[in-house]
Amino acid sequence: MVESEPSTPVAHEPAILIEHARKDYGKAAGGRREAVSDVSLAVSRGAIHGLLGPNGAGKTTTLKMLLGLVRPSGGRFEILGAPAAKSGARAQLGFLPEQPYFPPQLTAWEALRLYGQLSGMSTKQIAAEAEPLLERVGLAGKQKTLLSRFSRGMLQRLGLAQALLGSPSVVVLDEPASGLDPVGQRDVRNLMLEMRDTGASILLSSHQLSEVEAVCDEVTILNRGTVAARGHIDDLLNVAGRTSVRARGEGELPAAVASLVEDQAYSGALAAFSVADENVRRVVDALDDGDWQIVSVTPKRDSLEDYFSRLLAESGDLADTAAPARGDRPSPSEEVA
């Protein structure tokens, strides 16, 4: 497992703590199927934590164990320092499932009222929050529209609204941008950043690596039911010992520079490349002497997509993306805690 050192020490209990989570499902050919074998993660308070992994890696099962929707085979689960299974522990937690379902005969307002009542909110509190929430997620003016007339993207936005009812301090989002167009995906990213800025802690499970890279402070990557890597996103993606340089100039790079650079790319007069940290001053001076304009000098950073792909390739094989056989599916008694 790849693990980075934390950028700053954690001074208090995490918003979410999962230790040695494990889930075995019913008997299959050759024994039991282990959906999650050993997963540990901690979501820092006031942070957005990305949970990544290929299909079948155990992401959704891990979330369901935390939320009490699946009975764990083992492990420790805490929310704001309290055992997740304890009565009231999830009172400050909002949840958006991967594919939210709402009764189609209800209006958007009626759906929020129903879920607010189920969570113990007063009628006055629901009335005060519902309309601003619908506007916040891009459903202004849709309060009285039947959900049977909602598109997939509109239902996803409504799912976000119900997850935020009651202003929870901890939010779990499973594929929140699913079914949304690019504008909707941008709105979700902005909403998560806004929530973090007001002190909320977010656990985000997503296949959209660009979304995770844009908003997450921390990441945990799962593969085959175990943790393959975890840490602050900068610690994971920064390439040790190398610096990225972008410079603008005419013609070829100066000879003193060309022999020291790697990963060269050009766009018109703009050149981008990387150099070893110890050669940065030498390269910058040579570019300056050659009348090149330095645009930026930053630590070399992988894209999350490249890091993710390389990590899974180095593991030797990827998690099985096929759905479990019928005999592997959990019985109702196994599924719901």
Image (cartoon, grey):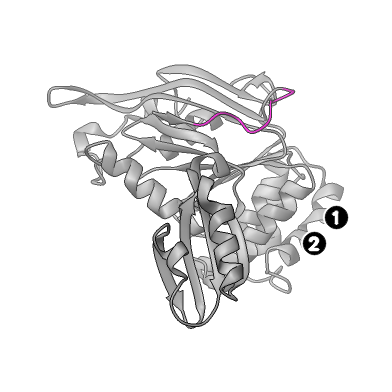
Q: Identify the residue position indicated by label 1 in the image.
A: 128
Q: Is residue 142 above or below residue 30?
A: below
Would you say residue 214 is visible in this rendering?
A: yes
What predominant SS class does the magenta segment belong to? loop
Classify 10 Å Cα crowding around label 2: few (below 14), some (14-19), many (20 and above): some
**Magenta-drawn stretch contains 5:** yes
Q: Is residue 23 above or below residue 202?
A: above
Provide the secondary structure element on which disc 2 rests. helix
Amino acid bearing label 1? Ala
Tag 2 near tag 1, CB within 8 Å: yes
The foreground one among 137 and 236 is 236
The foreground one among 204 and 92 is 204
Image quadrant holding the N terminus, namely top left
| Left or right relative to 102: residue 59 | left
Q: Identify the residue position indicated by label 2 in the image.
A: 132
Amino acid bearing label 2? Pro
| Left or right relative to 51: residue 289 | right
Q: Residue 134: where, in percent of width, then height?
A: 72, 63
Tell me what residue is drawn at x 58 percent, y 61 percent: 284
Q: Residue 89: where, in percent of width, then height?
A: 68, 25
Residue 130's quadrant in the figure?
Answer: bottom right
Mark-to-mark CA distance, 2 and 1? 8 Å
Q: Is residue 191 above or below residue 252?
A: above
**Magenta-drawn stretch contains 207:** no
Q: Range of the magenta residues?
A: 4-12
Q: Residue 119: where, in percent of width, then height?
A: 70, 39
- Number of labels in the image equals 2
Tell me what residue is drawn at x 20 percent, y 39 percent: 325
Would you say residue 107 is visible in this rendering?
A: no
Tell me what residue is drawn at x 42 percent, y 70 percent: 265
Q: Residue 158: where, in percent of width, then height?
A: 62, 60
